[in-house]
Amino acid sequence: MRYTKPALPLPQQVALLQSRGLLIEDVAQAEQDLARLSYYRLAAYFLAFQIPGDPTHRFRAGTTFAQTVRLYEFDEELRFLMFRATGVIEVALRAQLAYHNSLLLGPHWYENQAACINAGRFQSNLVELDKELNRAHEIFLDHYRARYSSPVRPPSWMALEVASFGLTSKLFNNLRSSNATKEMGRFFGVDAIVLRSWMRMLSYVRNVCAHHSRLWNRTLTVKPTLPRRPANQWLTTNTVADDRLYIVLVVAAYLQSAINEESGCKFKAAVKELLRQNPAVPAHIMGFPSGWEQEAFWQ
């Protein structure tokens, strides 16, 4: 079937929404919002206010355009919050990965195939790292290249500074269990198996945030393993959905507290404040259990 839908000018986009029952009090403001965000991006947020299963995409009675934009803005603030959190965690993962493995296996441990679980992933990770190294022109890399002829690649503490969170997570996930991975687990307060899972999940969430994609009601395609014996304060029960945003926020808070207690406290406070300021957002859709804010974990 051929796609034949035409592009609509902003006034017609507004008219289409009005025909579907959306209340638009300020047409000029609505056109400005559609111009800066696009109808297609907002359509994902319209769904939360439309009658389920209605083929005409009618909005529930009383829904305003301002409500849909506020939901988008809530999601935007949530993405910024998670992006900052994953940044803190990424830097700590780089530091721990370089430090413990360099002490155990030497500065260029990432070139040691015997230390890795899967040979194919080892090769693909090196190819990806080479691309990132070749794109980077940091002063410390230029200095290394100018001064040293061998090894061609820099030591891990330099190489990981230009590696993406995704690649750093892949390098960690492909390492065989060792004293280095155990020490990393101790630092983050969970065993290495759980930590591998969490880094895969957070790398995926970081990618969602970096591309400004919808986060608030996303179903996770990369799920975290829940810890059985966490070293630090955890939820009183593990009976929470492992594919909703709530567990992402819990993991991010836990890891930040392990890295730096103040960072963890600030993140928890920011999450609670964001939900407090947006009482109309249905928290249960994000996997928040009833009474979640009374949990000792969030205090």
Image: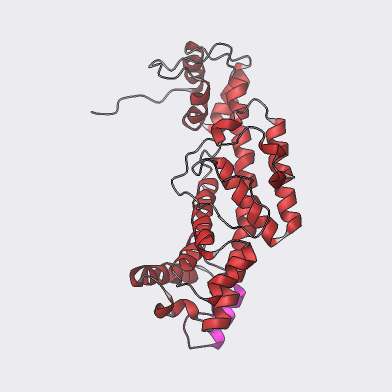
Find residue 230 and report its image quarter.
Answer: bottom right
Where the N terminus falls, by quadrant? top left
Residue 225's place in the image compared with 53, above or below, is: below
Question: Which residue occupies 55% across, 11% down?
Answer: 61
Looking at the image, is 82 positioned above or below residue 32? Answer: below
Question: Which residues, given as a range, are shown in magenta?
Answer: 138-157
Q: Position of residue 118 (x, y in %)?
A: 36, 70
Q: Quadrant of the C terminus?
A: top right
Residue 10 part of the magenta segment: no
**Count of labels in the image:** 0
Decide: is 151 above or below 72.
Answer: below
Colour logic: secondary structure
Residue 271 rendering spot, x and y as whole percentages = 68, 41
Between 10 and 91, the one lying in front of the other is 91
Q: In the image as oriented, which residue stretches furthest toward the left?
A: 1
Q: Quadrant of residue 270?
A: top right
Q: Position of residue 208 (x, y in %)?
A: 51, 46
Tell me residue 3's x, y (percent). 29, 28
Please indicate whether residue 170 sits to the left or right of residue 188 in the image. Answer: left
Residue pictured at 52% horizontal, 66% vertical:
163
Of 238 and 133, nearer the camera is: 238
Q: Is residue 91 visible?
A: yes
Quadrant of residue 258 in the image?
Answer: bottom right
Measuring 64% from the left and 67% from the top, which residue is drawn there? 187
Q: Is residue 158 visible?
A: no
Q: Closer to the camera, 126 or 289?
A: 289
